[in-house]
């Protein structure tokens, strides 16, 4: 049976997402090969967000003007090129920064505009599952990439080459499947974009800033803290590359499994996502403070991953109600621009850990998430 257009786009987003986290467990290999500091590792992880932010500043508006296809497909090809660039950059710390920056730019474009394209494509056939498909495929890709790369990085051949080549092959197949998906932006909306700059419906910018944006930060702050921060700050005594990859796979896989629950939970999805932050950061704080409870970091990270998936699904589901007609691309880009602030959390934790105990930092984040859960629950009851 032929896959629907939105599912083919989901495969494309899954493949692009898989590539973004291939370098995550391999950072430990780069550290040994290039004698890098922990701060350099988290900085390489975070520079991805910088490239993404720059891309998001233009991707959504470009997609609302010229269409989803013309923006997403070239960016998807660029994701493959970024993986090839990582292969060339394996002997240079400076080139690794550049490769990660480029990966962020093209991936952010695929995720933001691809989400809008997928949601609109599903809506065309009368389906409301677009936000969930987007959340599941992205978080699923985020899980697959590091899990495979971690195993190869620990025990496989060509650890700094083979994971990227596998991603390029998978992405080529995904682009082939998505190539015939039709454009969803009508010519009328594209023409209106030149004379109607407002991306949000009247009065809905406030809703975006005060309700959607705080939760959107959790989309990547939760899994990024678990995957990019905890392995460095807490550390694993054996097989650190494989365990980091496994932790990333479990964390982000939990997000993929949790995201479909949005259809059943409805407005309760957002406060439950924030509650996952309370549990996840609280458990991580215990793991950091009590050596005998170190393995508690694993289930805590899984809970954080589930919270990230729920936060993404809840945030995407809210966008059509606040976006002006034909401007979902711009609003989606705005959402991801806010969400990817969370990618800076590992760098923030690494910097603050020099002055404040790691356990105290994680406990503080649990307290913040408690306040967010209360705020999101209050909005859900309206």
Image (cartoon, grey):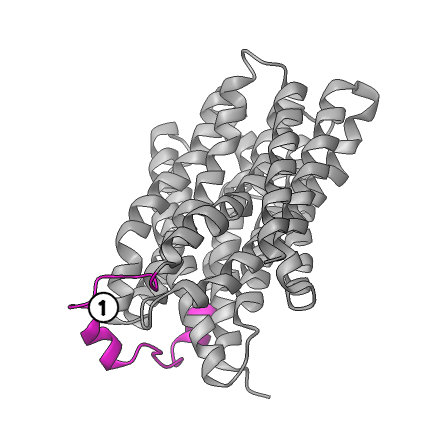
| Residue for point 43% across, 53% down | 208
Give SS at disc 1: helix
Determine the residue located farthest toward the right in the rendered image.
292
- From the image, tell me which residue sits under label 1: 65
Residue 185 in view (yes/no): yes
Q: Residue 294 at what x, y percent from top left?
A: 77, 26
Instruction: Please identify the quadrant where the N terminus is shown.
Output: bottom right
Q: Which residues are magenta?
A: 174-202
Q: Residue 139 at what x, y percent from top left?
A: 58, 55
Specify the quadrant of the image occupied by residue 296: top right
Q: Residue 130 at what x, y percent from top left?
A: 52, 71
Q: Is residue 220 above or below residue 12?
A: above
| Residue for point 75% across, 32% down | 283
* Left or right of 301 on screen, residue 11: left
Q: Residue 306 at what x, y percent from top left?
A: 67, 50
Q: Is residue 251 above or below residue 129?
A: above
Q: Is residue 201 magenta?
A: yes
| Residue for point 48% across, 27% down | 347
Q: Is residue 373 above or below residue 319?
A: above
């Amino acid at each position: 049976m032929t896959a629907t257009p939105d599912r083919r786009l989901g495969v494309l987003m899954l493949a692009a997402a898989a590539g973004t986290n291939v370098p995550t467990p391999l950072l430990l290999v780069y550290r040994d090969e290039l004698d890098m500091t922990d701060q350099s590792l988290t900085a390489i992880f975070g520079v991805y967000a910088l490239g993404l932010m720059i891309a998001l500043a233009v991707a959504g508006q470009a997609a609302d003007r010229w269409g989803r296809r013309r923006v997403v497909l070239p960016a998807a090809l660029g994701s493959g090129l970024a993986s090839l660039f990582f292969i060339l950059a394996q002997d240079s710390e400076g080139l690794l920064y550049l490769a990660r920056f480029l990966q962020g730019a093209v991936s952010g474009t695929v995720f933001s505009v691809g989400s809008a394209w997928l949601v609109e494509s599903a809506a065309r056939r009368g389906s409301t599952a677009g936000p969930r498909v987007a959340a599941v495929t992205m978080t699923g890709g985020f899980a697959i990439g590091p899990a495979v790369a971690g195993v190869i990085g620990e025990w496989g051949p060509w650890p700094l080459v083979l994971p990227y080549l596998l991603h390029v092959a998978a992405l080529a197949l995904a682009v082939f499947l998505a190539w015939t998906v039709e454009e969803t932006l009508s010519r009328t909306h594209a023409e209106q974009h030149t004379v109607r700059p407002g991306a949000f419906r009247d009065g809905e910018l406030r809703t975006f800033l005060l309700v959607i944006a705080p939760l959107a930060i959790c989309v990547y702050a939760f899994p990024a803290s678990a995957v990019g921060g905890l392995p460095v700050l807490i550390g694993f005594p054996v097989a650190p590359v494989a365990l980091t990859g496994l932790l990333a796979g479990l964390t982000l896989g939990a997000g993929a499994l949790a995201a479909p629950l949005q259809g059943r939970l409805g407005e309760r999805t957002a406060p439950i996502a924030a509650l996952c932050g309370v549990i996840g950061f609280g458990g991580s704080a215990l793991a950091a403070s009590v050596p005998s409870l170190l393995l508690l970091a694993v289930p805590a990270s899984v809970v954080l991953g589930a919270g990230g998936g729920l936060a993404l699904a809840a945030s995407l589901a809210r966008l059509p109600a606040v976006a002006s007609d034909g401007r979902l691309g711009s609003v989606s880009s705005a959402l991801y621009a806010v969400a990817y602030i969370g990618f800076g959390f590992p760098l923030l934790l690494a910097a603050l850990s020099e002055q404040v105990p790691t356990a105290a930092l994680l406990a503080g984040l649990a307290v913040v998430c408690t306040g967010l859960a209360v705020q999101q629950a209050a909005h859900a009851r309206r």
